[in-house]
Amino acid sequence: MATDELVKTTGIANHGGERLPSVDIDSFNIELKDDDGFLGDRASKGAFREILERWRKPLRKTGEDPFGKEPSENISKKTLDSILISDDVEASAVVHSAIEEFAQELAYVTRRFLKTKAWAKTERIVVGGGFRDSRLGELAIARAEIILKAEDFKIDMVPIRHHPDEAGLIGALHLAPSWIFEAYDSILAVDIGGTNIRCGLVETGWKKAKDLSKAKVVKSELWRHADDEPTREGAVKRLTKMLKGLITEAEKDGFKLAPFIGIACPGVINADGSIEKGAQNLPGNWESSKFNLPASLIEGIPAIGEHDTAIVMHNDGVVQGLSEVPFMQDVDRWGVLTIGTGLGNARFTNRHRDSGNGKDRDAAEGKKKAKENNKENNKENNKDSAKAD
């Protein structure tokens, strides 16, 4: 079978693995629910636009809507940010009101995550996704943190450090084993979303900082596949072409490119590289048992340089969170929430190495803990929502 061959070819690590070089993944892609549906829908970028629209309605009835007839979903984040500091007090008040209500929703959703077994004892939450890339997003995150601290939750909420467009590429470095960084100075990374596919050449910066804190995206290419509405096969063909172009550029610019591709992709990723669920916004049926993205890419790019291509794919929320690994070493347990079309989520436990034998402190119980937590989360999802906050 193609999947059997894939595991042998890309045997660096399992796709969607619970154990990575720097962290154990306690859970990811949890789908919590209440009476109104999935909790993530209450803290998405679409939810913010709906809240903004509700605050505009009373003013629209009296003909005093400061935004005129412009639909709320069409007002750019840049415009909303500028209104926050403008002289138009009424427009600024509308945006501040929407931020406050969204912050309450984000705090509610975060509270529910913190009460699951997998997220117990979380010390810090990094918030990423496109919504974070704005002043209004930063204010909503800060306000949600204040709300939770007022309720005695000992939690820090911080915006993701890297630009959200680059975090999903830089995080792919943490899917790779450390020996790659000793021999090579860059990797290829792919961040797949419901609207865009982004590929990047990521420089490790390993010689400057072995914790990868100096990593950066040196070249990238974006394709808005939602505009073209390609077939699944067409999307893979275009992605392969993009990656080949980056390989050529890396060679031309003198990079020592590793024979490794890290992929961030929506959904629950199985160990063989298939997608169990959550890929409904991608072009075509990516959840088909007959489709395997890593295997398809290896067919198109069987080697990089003189070595066979190795690929590791993981959930996009996980990979975006992994970009924060170097900056989370002062805590043990931390999580990521990515505010986009939906609400991505993942919880991590850092793997600390003993100085004596080099073995991981948590080696004996990492996998067992992750499986128990995911099992517990499935039970919690079926609880009556009346028991929620």
Image (cartoon, rainbow, N blue to C red):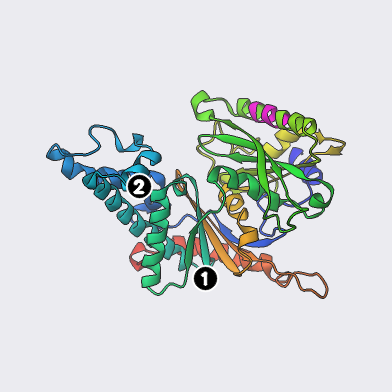
**In the depicted structure, whether residue 68 falls above or below residue 320:** above
Query: Horizontally, is 376 left or right of 97 in the view?
Result: right
Count residues near mark 1 (Cα–Cα under 10 Å), then give few for <14, some for 14-19, many for 20+. Answer: some
Q: Residue at left 65%, top 66%?
A: 350
Instruction: Identify the disc placed on residue 17.
Output: none
Q: Is residue 34 visible?
A: no
Crowding at dot 2, Cα within 10 Å, few <14 / some 14-19 / many 20+, comes out as: many
The percent coordinates of residue 293 (x first, y second) are: 67, 37
Residue type of the residue flagged with mark 2: Phe
Q: Main secondary structure of the magenta part?
A: helix
What residue occupies the far right of the structure in this picture? 306
- The location of residue 247, given as percent across then percent down, is 75, 32
Distance, label 2 to label 1, CA atoms, is 27 Å
Q: Nearer the viewer, residue 227 or 372?
A: 227
Magenta stretch, residue numbers: 238-244
Q: Residue at x 78, y 30 (%)?
A: 252
Q: Specify whether residue 311 is painted magenta.
A: no
For badge 1, the amino acid type reads Ala
Q: Which residue of the protein is positioned furthest toward the front in this rendering?
A: 87
Residue 239 sits inside the magenta stretch: yes
Q: Earlier in the sequence, mark 2 or mark 1?
A: 2
**106 above or below 262?**
below
Q: Circle 2 sits on which residue? A: 48
Please name the residue that numbered disc 1 is placed on.
Answer: 120
Q: Quadrant of the C terminus?
A: bottom left
